[in-house]
Amino acid sequence: METTIENPWLKWQAAFAEEGMTEMKRWSRLPLIAEKARKVTKGATPSEVVHRVDHIKLLHYPSSKPVKHKTPLLVVFALVNRPYILDLKEKRSVIRHFVDAGFDTYLIDWGSPTLADRYLSLDDYINRYMDGLVDFVCERTGSSKTSILGYCMGGTMSTIYTALHRERVANLMLMAAGIDFSTREGLLNLWADPNYFDVDDFVDTFGNCPAEFLQSSFLMLKPVGNLIEKPLNFMENVHNDKFVEDFLTMETWLNDNISVPGEIFREFVKHLYQKNQLVKDELHVRNQRVQLKDVTCPLLNIVAKGDDLVPCSQSLALNDLVGSTDRKTMLVPGGHIGLAVGGKAQRETWPAVCEWLAERSNFK
Amino acid sequence: MSEGKDTPWEQAAAFQKIWSETFSKMTQGTFQFSPDSAPPEFMRQMRSSMFQALGKTWEEFMRSPEFLSSMKQTMDSAIAFKKMTNEFLVKAHDEMQGTSKEDLRALLAAVGRMEANVHARLDRLEERLDEMTSKPPAAKNKSAGKAAARPKKAVAKKKTVTKKKAATRKRSR
């Protein structure tokens, strides 16, 4: 009688033998991990520092191909991590997409704050630093306006900047930007509740928000995944060179947290997370009220479906609050970081974003 | 139960509950195997379902009032400890006649306040300048006429002075 079912005992024997061989490969690759970790590079696309203000650098990404679009692009990242996640590897680079699409691309590297930066506030970052850098980019490129791409906290800051300085912004693109903090979907929103977190006491005692505190908070959002599954997964795939390279690159960035200046941390937690003033038009920056309806430029809101750091509902609220008539939402599968470096995002989302922006940028 | 202040017993009970729930969900996951799977694959599937169950239970627990209050207690203790070490170090620096972080902080705060004052003054100056430059046309012409008249007089005066100087020089020679 013919049968398709294999002998399970033989199948199990073969599986054990294969697993044994793989285990030997894993152990043989372990001594090479340290060397591979040392070779990890931060940033793939060639860049040059074109301007410095205090500890902040403005990076420009020159291209061998001619620039096609007159309106330059300024990328604004969050204050809590290094910005090279947007340019992690050759085939995982958001910056590369824009450079190859012919955009004159700039990125703000906020640097690492020191004790002296403890009193830097939203006003300093938005009205002094961002406005100054936008001025510089416009002057350098001969354009009266610039397009802005903001990621996470950088997206929130970019929204506030656009509301206050709309005459300088041609297009606003946001990635996982927190706008409406009333939701309790995300654990961070819950943990930042004033009943459980006294931000004034925290900032008055610690000064700048320590990088270790932020790192621990992010890890605790998924403790099982980050502390148990991830190391096990790494050990199981340590014989796979490509996996190890990707893993080490990502881990280098994930552990490269920086501290956040005390005052802006206090303002973010108090005025946004706790009092949700941005959506209520109650947020003031240097006595100027921030009103989301003052954002009138074309808006592209890119949101990750599986984002546990900035849940969808936090970002999606923006489109109904702005004054823009040209507004679009892109809901992308993946998490907070997958939005930038995920395979699908690289293949589908970013080419579409470049297309959207190209239609709204003056041609040279 | 007093509001926001769970006793250690209540917190321990909450921890016990989460572990018992976790183990029951994990054991449910162990029965989802297929006899066709080889042992290593079967072990991975079992492990994956166990971790999934563990992850879900932990997330529920991290939203519970017990966890949040224990988190607040931990944070309060950390802040109190940091304050204590800060005070100790400030005293130590003062005794050694050195500069402490607190002194630097006070200095930075003072610089920040000065900076804010300067910015406020610059803003007020900018407003006044805007007001002056945005005067109505009639007022502008009047003031322009006055301004036009002034330089001529100054030039005339300068010429007279220059002539006088030249005359003085001639006489001295």
Image (spheres, coloured by chain):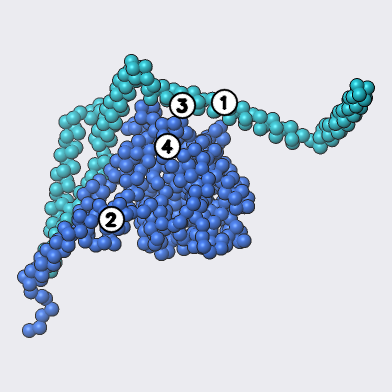
Chain colours: A blue, B cyan
Instruction: Tell me which corner region of the image, top left, top right, bottom left or bottom right, holds residue A271.
Output: top left
Are the numbered discs 2 and 4 placed on the same chain, yes or no?
yes
User: Tag 4's secondary structure?
Assistant: loop
Name the residue at 45% across, 35% down. Answer: A264
| Residue that protrudes farthest toward the top in the picture | B95
Q: Disc count in the image?
A: 4
Q: Is residue A348 left or right of residue A232?
A: right
CA neighbours of label 2 inside 10 A, class few (<14), some (14 to 19), many (20+) = some
The residue beneath circle 1 is B117
The CA span between labels 1 and 4 is: 23 Å
The residue beneath circle 4 is A113
The CA span between labels 3 and 4 is: 14 Å
Which label's residue is closer to the chain start, 2 or 4?
A: 2
The residue beneath circle 3 is B108
When the figure is inspected, residue A246 is found, relative to residue A163, above or below; the finding is below
When the figure is inspected, residue B142 is found, relative to residue A17, above or below; the finding is above
Name the residue at 20% across, 33% down. Answer: B11
Say which of A12 and A72 sits in front: A72
User: Tag 2's secondary structure?
Assistant: helix
The answer to whether residue A178 of the structure is visible from this angle is no
Chain containing mark 2: A
Name the residue at 38% across, 38% down. Answer: A259
Name the residue at 56% across, 63% down. Answer: A66
